Amino acid sequence: MAKGKDFYGKDIAEVIEQACRELGAGREDLDIEVLDTGSSGIFGLCKKKAHIRVRRKAAGPEPQPAAESPRIEPVDPETGEAETVEPAPVETRTERRRPARVSEPAVEPTDRADDEATGEAVAPVEEEPEEPPSAEALEQIRADLGQLLELMGFPSEVRVVFEDNTVHCTITGAHEEQIVGPEGRTLDSLQYLLRKMVAACVPDRIMLALDAGGFRERRAGELRERALELAEQVKADGKTQAIPALNPSERRVVHMALQEDKGVRSRSVGEGLFKKVLIYKPGKGRRPSSRKRRGGQGGRTSGD
């Protein structure tokens, strides 16, 4: 059982007990790796079982008996006879058995950040490529999204495919406008909720994108045009311009549209999921320095 055996159950305690019972061993005799703690899902959908991988601990080498010290037989200088001296007892140390260690599930990063100063994507840490979701997982996502739309009162046709490390979910039907909402806010909220619902089916390193009626492509085109127009205004009058309330993918569209223009810079500011993008002339969009100048005067902020 070098590779270990997988066990599934309702929760971690139950599945460990099941493994000990099936393997006929105590918990301290097993190496237990927790792969998933399980979850009850959202709205009862996409429930996830607890998952562990168990290996028997390798048996350590048998303790070797301590070698006896040779007897020392000095010669009595008066009689010339050898004297027998018994060896001193050798103390042995018994190694304490260490308790079994249950490894915690690895915490993986959930999002890819963009460079706030330049708008360029930060190079991700090199990792092993993630296995694509199975056909069964994609079908489960399609069914969950379809049921969610039914509960919202917007029954629609749903198509789910996996391309470029992204699960693309496309909605078509008579309710596209309501599903998209003002400036895509309803669609963004629905995408966030779906991501949480299918967390058991889609690893964090695989992205999920939700679209309805081709809204994402139209929105990206509009943002690129607006970014270029504002960039021309900034170069003409030097005043900083802003595009408010953009989600991460929309902010990336703006940054990419302006990255080749040496006359302007862009960066994201704000808190939370939705931030605004500032477009400014080089040297005017820097954050104020935390250091104070001589004489107690702080650095000035310009451009915002």
Image (tube, rainbow, N blue to C red):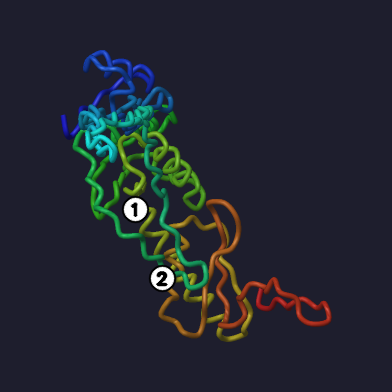
Label 1's element? Answer: loop
Q: Which numbered disc covers residue 191? A: none
- At label 1, counting other C-alpha atoms closer than 10 Å, the crowd grade (few under 14, some 14-19, many 20 or more) is few
Residue 82 shows in the view: yes
Rendered position, 194 above or below 126: above
Q: Which part of the image, by quadrant, shows the N terminus?
A: top left
Residue visible at 26% across and 42% down in the picture: 160
Query: What residue is pinned by disc 1?
Result: 214
Which amino acid type corresponds to the residue marked 1 in the rendered image?
A: Gly
Residue closest to the eye, 182 or 98: 98
Give how far across and how far down residue 90 sits, in percent. Answer: 32, 31
Residue visible at 35% across and 25% down in the picture: 47
Residue visible at 82% across and 77% down in the picture: 296
Indicate which disc, 2 or 1, sits on the residue closer to the N terminus.
1
Q: Residue furthest right?
A: 295
Location of residue 51 (image quadrant)? top left
For the residues labelled 2 and 1, the Cα–Cα distance comes to: 20 Å
- At label 2, counting other C-alpha atoms closer than 10 Å, the crowd grade (few under 14, some 14-19, many 20 or more) is some
Give how far across and how far down residue 208 sits, in percent. Answer: 35, 47
Rendered position, 216 above or below 64: below
Give how far across and how far down residue 269 sits, in percent. Answer: 59, 63
Give how far across and how far down residue 46 sits, in percent. Answer: 34, 28
Query: What residue is pinned by disc 2?
Result: 256
Label 2's element? Answer: helix
Residue 212 shows in the view: no
Q: Which part of the image, by quadrant, shows the C terminus?
A: bottom right
Residue 28 left/right relative to 69: right
Residue visible at 38% across and 55% down in the picture: 216
Which amino acid type corresponds to the residue marked 2 in the rendered image?
A: Met
